[in-house]
Image (spheres, rainbow, N blue to C red):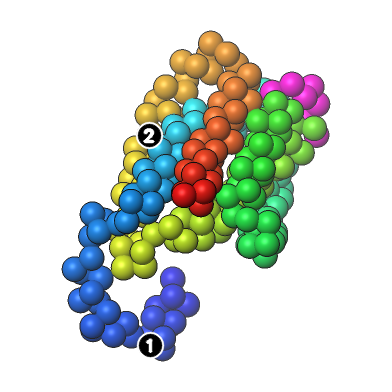
Amino acid sequence: AILGIFLAMILPRTPITQIELNKQATITDFTKSQKQMYKAFSMEEMIIGFTSGLVVPFIDYYILTEFDPSISTWGFIFGISNSTIAIGNFMVGRYSEGFGKGNTLLILNLFSPLFALGIALAPQFSWVALFYILRSGVANAVQPAWNSWFYMHTPDTVRGRSLSIININRRFTRAVGTAAGPSLFVLLGPLLFPLGCLFYPLAMAIPRKAEISINKN
């Protein structure tokens, strides 16, 4: 926070004319293709939000109650998990440009249900911890590529407002998913994790399909 305040003080200000242009721009000014992509991104993020609400909180609950790791062990695993995300952010940000952001997101999300299946079926805590770290890394490392992909199809004058609406939808559906999670976890047990994560690549295929359709036209 302190660094952010310092940077805000020394970085150049946005010209007043640009601010006025941004105020006048609205989401309704999107072109047909931009509207198509925005709807696809919105639908994808709502699905991801609901699914992550079903899965993410209860993976931690399952591991903590089923295997009862010590505080230090759990802290170590969580630290490694976040380090994996940091490394993944760097790698995805560096190489997704050449491979294609949509392709990168789609392929990486295919690994999420596989690693979630490992969490559900692995009998030993060491394997569960490994799959937990890998699933967390894959699911979260894609964020820089997603942001860049979204901005590619969104005018810079309304990026903040359009992204805020998508984030509201994602958080709301995540809350609904978390509310529904206990009942489904009781019904399915840890198999809820891979079944829920199957929707990650399916959701990501929605904007990728829309992008392919636009490029063909």
Q: At 51% from the left edge and 56% from the top edge, which residue is drawn?
A: 149
Q: Quadrant of residue 4?
A: bottom left
Q: What amino acid is labelled 2 in the image?
A: Thr
Dot 1 or dot 2, earlier in sequence: 1
Q: Residue at x 49, y 44 (%)?
A: 213
Which residue in the structure is indicated by mark 1?
12
Q: Residues within 10 Å of mark 2 (few under 14, many from 20)?
A: many
Q: Position of residue 211 (x, y in %)?
A: 50, 48
Residue 123 within the magenta-colored segment of the rendering:
yes
Q: Which mark is residue 173?
A: 2
Q: Furthest-front residue in view?
A: 217
Type of amino acid at the residue the image marks with label 1: Pro
Q: Nearer the viewer, residue 147 or 86?
A: 147
What residue span does the magenta drawing correspond to? 120-126
Q: Residue at x 20, y 76 (%)?
A: 20
Q: Residue at x 66, y 44 (%)?
A: 108
Image quadrant occupied by the N terminus: bottom left
Query: Is residue 145 shown in magenta?
Result: no
Pick the front one: 61 or 106: 106
Asked if residue 154 lies left or right of residue 185, the reply is left
> In the rendered image, is residue 23 in sight?
yes
Which image quadrant for residue 98? bottom right
